[in-house]
Amino acid sequence: MRQVSLREFRTRGAKALEAVPTGETILLSGQQGPAYFLVPVAGDVALMDRELRRALAKASLRETWRLAGEIGLHSISDDEIEHEIAQVRTARRTRKAG
């Protein structure tokens, strides 16, 4: 994977990508660090889009599980979850009625 600065990509566009081999993923980075991936498209665009979205969703889920583990939510019971859901639903009904 090659890395290209956002500034270079913004100012030079295609020229900035000429040195990158065909098919290689590019990481665009700004002053705050990595910002975007440029992923080459080969074949069925709709299929690649679904696969990319699925991979991003899995990564997000793993991060959520990690965060839940850090604050102790990974070990709550089904009854505790149902109680929390009931509280939220009650609060929503109260807001709509008021």
Image (cartoon, rainbow, N blue to C red):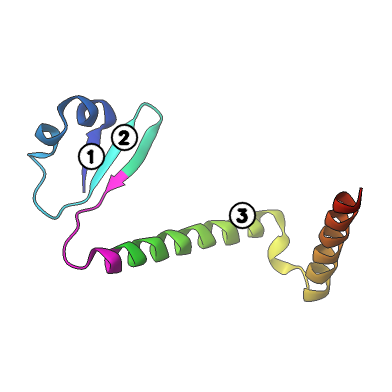
- Look at label 2 and name its amino acid: Ser
**What segment carries the magenta color?**
37-48
**Disc 2 on helix, strand or loop?**
strand
In the rendered picture of this protein, how many numbered marks are placed on residues? 3
**Disc 3 on helix, strand or loop?**
helix
Q: Position of residue 5 (x, y in %)?
A: 25, 31
Front residue of this view, candidates 85 and 60: 85
Residue 38 forms part of the magenta stretch: yes
**Disc 1 on helix, strand or loop?**
strand
Q: Residue at x 35, y 66 (%)?
A: 50
Disc marking residue 3: 1
Q: Which is more N-terminal, label 1 or label 3?
A: 1
Near mark 3 (Cα within 10 A), the count class, few <14, some 14-19 or many ≥20, is few
- Look at label 3 and name its amino acid: Leu
Q: Quadrant of residue 14?
A: top left
Q: Residue at x 58, y 58 (%)?
A: 64
C-alpha gap between disc 3 and disc 1: 29 Å
- Look at label 1 and name its amino acid: Gln
Front residue of this view, candidates 63 and 6: 6
| Residue at which label 2 appears | 29
| Residue at which label 3 appears | 67
Near mark 2 (Cα within 10 A), the count class, few <14, some 14-19 or many ≥20, is some
* Farthest residue, direction bottom: 78
